[in-house]
Amino acid sequence: MDAIKKRMNALRIEADDSAAKVDELAAKVKTLEQENLSKEQEITSLQHKNQMLESEVEKLEGMHKDAKAAADESAQHGTQNESLTRRLQLLEEEAEENDKVLRETNEKLRQTDVKAGHYERKVQALENDRDQWEKKYEDMAKKYADTKKELDDFVSEIGNI
């Protein structure tokens, strides 16, 4: 019986050890289940973060595409700006040349106006001279006619005598 008691004690000890081990393993299982639950929650959270980051990446890619398009458009505007700047410069040079030609033309016009005024005065003087000559001619023609009449009268008087 001693052997049975020993065996029973051994079995009790073994059962206690097993129960302790079961308790320990149950606690370990519970800890692992909690860790598993925590990991699943972390996975869910990370999946959600991943989805958020993917949408953010898509948003950033869209913004990058828009920025690239804006940069291309800006480059095109830069090219157009350079072209317009060159054209503006050419137009300014042409305007300066036109201003120079206009000043020269205005100077020539002023000189022509001065000459025209001079010639108008000469024409006026010549017209006055002509008018005086016409008046003298008319006076002389009248004197001639009068003198001729006197001569004709005198000749006719002489012829009657």
Image (cartoon, rainbow, N blue to C red):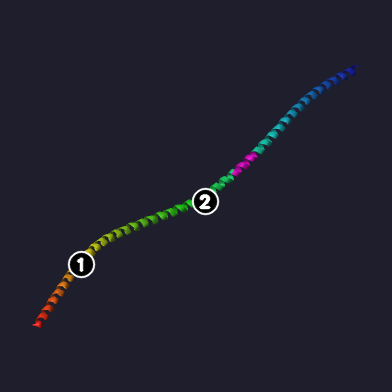
Foreground residue among 133 and 110: 133
- Predominant SS of the magenta segment: helix
Q: Secondary structure at mark 2?
A: helix
**Relative to 29, residue 91 above or below:** below
Q: Is residue 1 left or right of residue 57?
A: right
Q: Is residue 70 left or right of residue 36?
A: left
Q: Which residues are magenta?
A: 53-62
The answer to which image quadrant residue 147 occupies is bottom left
**Which x, y percent locates residue 118?**
24, 62
Disc 2 target residue? 76
Neighbour tally class for label 2: few under 14, some 14-19, many 20 plus, Cα within 10 Å: few
Residue lying at 64% horizontally and 38% vertically, measured from the top left:
53
The answer to which image quadrant residue 21 occupies is top right
**In magenta stretch: residue 55:** yes
Neighbour tally class for label 1: few under 14, some 14-19, many 20 plus, Cα within 10 Å: few
Foreground residue among 20 and 154: 154
Q: Is residue 42 left or right of residue 6?
A: left
Number of the label disc, if any, that sits on residue 131: 1
Foreground residue among 103 and 96: 103
Q: Amino acid at mark 2?
A: Gln
